[in-house]
Image (cartoon, rainbow, N blue to C red):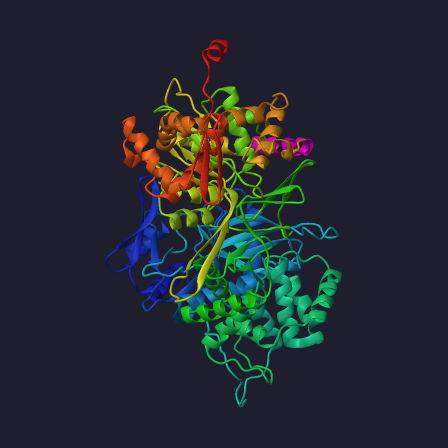
Amino acid sequence: MDNKSALKQIVELAGCGYSELERNDGKKAYYAKDGEITDNVIRAHLDGSQPIGINMNVGDDKSHFAVFDLDDHNGQYEAGTMRKRLGFVAAALHSLNIPYFAVRSGGGRGYHLWVTFENAARMDTIRARMRDVLDTANDVLSQSPWDHEKFVPDDGQGKGMFHDTEVVFRRSGRPDKSDTTKIEHHIELLPKGGKRPVVALPLALESIVLTPTEIDETGAMQFDEGGEIVLQKAKPRKTGPKSGQRTKAVDVDAALRAFTKARPGGGYKSWSDAGFNIFGAFGEDGYEHWLTYSKQTDGFESESDVRSKWSDIAKAGKCGPEPFWAYARAGGYAGGLPDGVQIGNKGEQTKLILDDVVGSLKLFRDPDGTAYARVGPRRIMRIDSIEFADWLRRTAYSSGVTASQEQINLVVGIARAHAYETVEDVHLRVARQDNRIYVDLCDADDRVLIISADGVELIDGDEECPVVFRRSRQLPIELGDGSGSLDDIRAMVNMDDDQFIVFMACAVKMFFPDTPSPIVNLIGEYGSAKTSTTRMLRTLIDPVSAMVAPGSDKVDDVLVRAWHNYVLTLENMSDLTKLSDTLCGITTGMGFEVRQLFTNGDLFSIWVRRPVIVNGIDPSKYAADLISRMVEIELEKPEKRMLESEFEQQLAESAPRMFIGAVALVMEVLKVLPQIDAHAFADNVRLAEFGAIGEATARVMGRDEGWFIEKMVEAQDIAQDEAADDSATMQALESFQEPVARRGEFWGTPQELLIELQQSAEIIGLNPSRLPMTAATLSRELNQLKPSLRKRGWEIDKKSRKWRLVPPPEISADEIAAM
């Protein structure tokens, strides 16, 4: 058969029109055309004047063709290397008795391997057969000098044509084993599905046919250039029992190949879990099967390594035989099952796989009762979350089955029940343990940074972390090239040097989650970049997509936000009165209970302790509890305002260096912190632990001993005095001072005191409605005003539910002159 006749036969099998190759905006693409593919169309295709493509979908999502596309777009491989890789795939087709023909592109680096089927088959079935071919090719590769390479099908994940990725399989936590490297080659498998999957008709643009000759010593097929297309059609794959056989025979080899396809490995845990499945199916006699499986998975090093792990698996022996055979069925195994093993329809098969997946996970709950599953060495997911349900679906799908919502709900309920047997502390973004600070970088590799006085370490690979982290909407923290300093942070803020030290003390405190944190209040005139500085401060430890979100005065909303965010930011809050007690509790640590949705009596409980950032808040009108926890940082208006787009770009570029600068400062603070006794100033500073961390930060940044504490006490006194001056109750007491002084003291109930204060307010023209409305409210405000009243010379006590007030003595003219 000459090439022209072969192309006509291919076109006839396609039977759904054709597409012409055209350029649009400098890019090549195939555009559908109406009409028959005539001799002239074929002739124009062969001479290169008008290349065409064919629609692989003949209807009903079926096709007659399968095409392996090995296309080196970047020209990064030698022609001989590409030819060798083509040879391994061709050798796999040869060993499976699947006829094919090969075509080289006109450029000489790309190849198409065509398979033509006698009967049109579903496109997903064709792709499954193509993946089997790549599995066979990988078996050949594993016995060749290129055993570190692996073919991977491109299932529409964005990997282009022939694309390779270097994957390092880390053996962290196993010092006797080195890391292994695998080069994964992604090959495009056609058809990809859809109504019009198009492929270029062979032999356009100077492409040529390759004629297979022999398989060389490495196992790859060799080719001669030139020849004619030999169009042989592949037969349908037969399944079921042989002729005359009443039941299907058990084909262990076929089952193991199918199992490997459904459970291909991908890390130490996946490899280990597969071992339990094999042991469950074959017992101690399954070692050879385990060894065969292990040699085909990533990270295989030696038989002794496999035998050692098999010994551990045999001692545990916690799996039955059904999961292995369920995975084999999902991988395409159509043979018989051993006696005693019954797997019904696909629903039962899916349920077995889901049960096995959940059974291999570590399940636990936190002290609040929230249930979690560990899905990776350092990754956990809340069992009742959509994230975990989606993870189960993806895991099942990767094994070849599709889980229904009912099946997902069932296994989630079972997982939640088993999770209550173990309790573990769960942290968000930052944890501190044994004077070491752990920061979850929240990246795709689940890396964790450890900061201590001795330096910085990074946990990655398969190594577990001593503390457990959950995630919500946290963004990754980038490390960049590992360089950075405080200068990178200083360049992003507008404040004087003293305020910058207080600012960095607040930033360092965010790395210490185990003690109460201050409420950072960024103040300044309009245009002083309060919002931008809020975002920058949060970037140092807890970047999220909504860095600064509008605040809410609903307590439930604020607490739920605090549970999902390590740093709580409140933007555009003109009044914190309704949230005063809540914010005090969040910074100190508080629990929260609310009726769980869709239940009548269950409670949903959370406990949070978080750093809080607000901006532009005037604290003078708030209660002493809130004021004593608030640290004001005054910003200066920059000489030139930066565009929002410029700030976004600068923040993104500076973030890795700023983080490294903050980490370096935290490391130095950990060295100095043991020298500071927080008890020494606990009576003067409300947040003593923050005072100690701030004092250590100031010393590291060059300030004298006691500088930070002095600043804190001064700022706290000023804030309390301002709050007292703004208090209507304080103003009424000052007008009440003279008549009380004549009596010597006031001794009476809160109600009696409220009546007298209302009378004093009228005398000085103060609106009585500004005073507390009830005696109980007055008592609470007097408790908050005690420090300021005593500082101003008042004696104030409460005994037997009565208040005793003694005003300060009058100052004589001589004393005034002396002052």
The answer to whether any part of residue 384 appears in the image is yes
Q: Residue furthest left?
A: 34
The spot of residue 801 in percent (x, y) is 45, 45
**In the depicted structure, whether residue 514 falls above or below residue 714:** below
Tell me if 245 is positioned left or right of 561 in this view: right
> How many numbered marks, from 0 up?
0
Between residue 702 and residue 261, name the one nearer to us.
Answer: 702
Q: Quadrant of the N terminus?
A: bottom left
Q: Is residue 584 above or below residue 258?
A: above
Residue 514 among those drawn in magenta: no
Residue 20 in the image, given as x and y percentages of width and height: 30, 51
Q: Is residue 416 left or right of residue 285?
A: left
Residue 318, by quadrant, is bottom right
Rendered residue at 37%/59% (across/down)? 4
> What percent of the width, then of the height, locates residue 311?
74, 67
Position of residue 294 measured from the top left corner of the image (x, y, whole percent): 66, 63
Magenta-colored stretch includes residue 666: yes
The residue drawn where x is 42% and y is 66% is 601
Residue range corresponding to the magenta coloring: 661-675
230 vs 644, nearest the viewer: 644
The furthest residue to the front? 743
Q: Quadrant of residue 698?
A: top right
Q: Nearer the viewer, residue 577 or 751?
A: 751
Task: Tell me, yes or no, if residue 652 can be seen here.
Answer: no
Front position in the image: 230 or 720: 720
Q: Is residue 608 above or below residue 529?
A: below
Q: Main secondary structure of the magenta part?
A: helix
